[in-house]
Each structure stands twice: as structure tokens, then as C-alpha cells.
Image (spheres, rainbow, N blue to C red):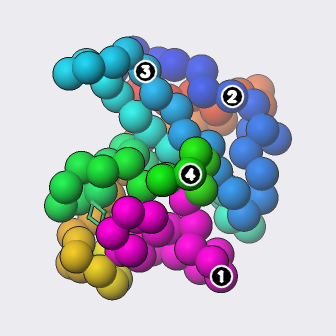
């Protein structure tokens, strides 16, 4: 994968996230980045069992208490740290991690 600049580190709010989409149709690639306790976590924006984007409302990736990532369509909850589904129809499966790094304040996707 080529490297893409997603946004600035400070553009991801603490306790919040942002989704990113590239291309369209069969080439669509969708990712999201969330920030918790100052750390970033990034995943492919596709639930493990049906491939639905997690955010029914744009950029809403956390459940109500902010402890887990949530598939808004099906109610599955995922650990923030590793994307493992702890509850819901995807239980026991995991979100696919996306490789990111921060360079001079820019969040970069890819290797
Ligand atoms: S895709 Fe939504 S819970 Fe599995």
C-alpha cells in the first residue's frame, strides 16, 4: 500500500474518531482512526461478519460510555486496543488493523 496522509494528530479529538474513504465502488477503501488517552488506534471500517461500516452516523465509533468501539448497525462492541469483538454478532472476531504512524504531526496510513 502506498502511504497516504490522513490528517493532523490534533484533528482526531480525544475520545473521538474520524473515518476516511478512498476511491469508490469495488475499489473503496475505508478506514477509521480513534484516539483514547492520547493514543491512536486505526482499523479498516468494516465489521467482521457483514462488512458494514461501524459508524452509522459519520465519525461515531465509540459506544455510549466510550469504553468500546461500536458497530452502530448491529450493536457489536470491540476492544479499542486490538479490535477484538467482546459482544454481539461478531463476538470472537476482530476488526482488521490499519497501519498508521505519526510523522511531524501528520497521521500517515500505510507502510
Ligand atoms: S458487521 Fe456490524 S456487528 Fe458485525
Residue drawn 19% across the image and 55% down it: 50
Q: Nearer the viewer, mark 2 or mark 4?
A: 4
| Residue 59 position (above or below residue 5) | below
Q: For the image shown, how many numbered marks are present on the structure? A: 4
Say which label, 4 or 3, has the lower sequence index: 3
**Where on the picture, by quarter, is residue 26?**
top left
Q: Residues within 10 Å of mark 1 (few under 14, many from 20)?
A: few
Q: Which residue is denoted by mark 2 in the rendering?
A: 7
Q: Which residue is denoted by mark 3 in the rendering?
A: 22
Q: Position of residue 61 (x, y in %)?
A: 55, 59
Q: Which residue is denoted by mark 4 in the rendering?
A: 57
- Quarter of the image with the C terminus is top left
Q: Nearer the viewer, mark 4 or mark 1?
A: 4
Q: Are marks 2 and 4 in contact (CB under 8 Å)?
A: no
Label 1, label 3: how many angstroms apart (C-alpha)?
A: 30 Å
Q: Nearer the viewer, mark 2 or mark 3?
A: 3
**Disc 4, SS:** loop
Q: Which residue is denoted by mark 1 in the rendering?
A: 65
Is 37 inside the magenta-drawn segment? Answer: no
Read off the magenta span. 61-84
Say which label, 2 or 4, has the lower sequence index: 2
Amino acid at each position: 500500500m502506498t502511504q497516504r496522509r490522513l490528517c493532523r494528530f490534533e484533528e482526531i479529538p480525544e475520545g473521538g474518531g474520524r473515518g476516511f474513504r478512498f476511491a469508490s465502488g469495488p475499489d473503496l477503501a475505508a478506514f477509521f482512526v480513534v484516539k483514547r488517552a492520547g493514543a491512536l488506534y486505526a482499523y479498516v471500517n468494516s465489521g467482521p461478519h457483514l462488512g458494514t461500516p461501524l459508524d452509522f452516523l459519520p465519525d461515531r465509533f465509540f459506544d455510549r460510555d466510550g469504553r468500546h468501539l461500536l458497530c452502530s448497525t448491529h450493536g457489536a462492541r470491540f476492544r479499542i486496543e486490538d479490535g477484538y469483538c467482546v459482544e454481539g454478532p461478531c463476538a470472537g472476531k476482530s476488526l482488521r488493523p490499519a497501519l498508521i504512524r505519526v510523522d511531524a504531526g501528520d497521521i500517515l496510513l500505510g507502510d
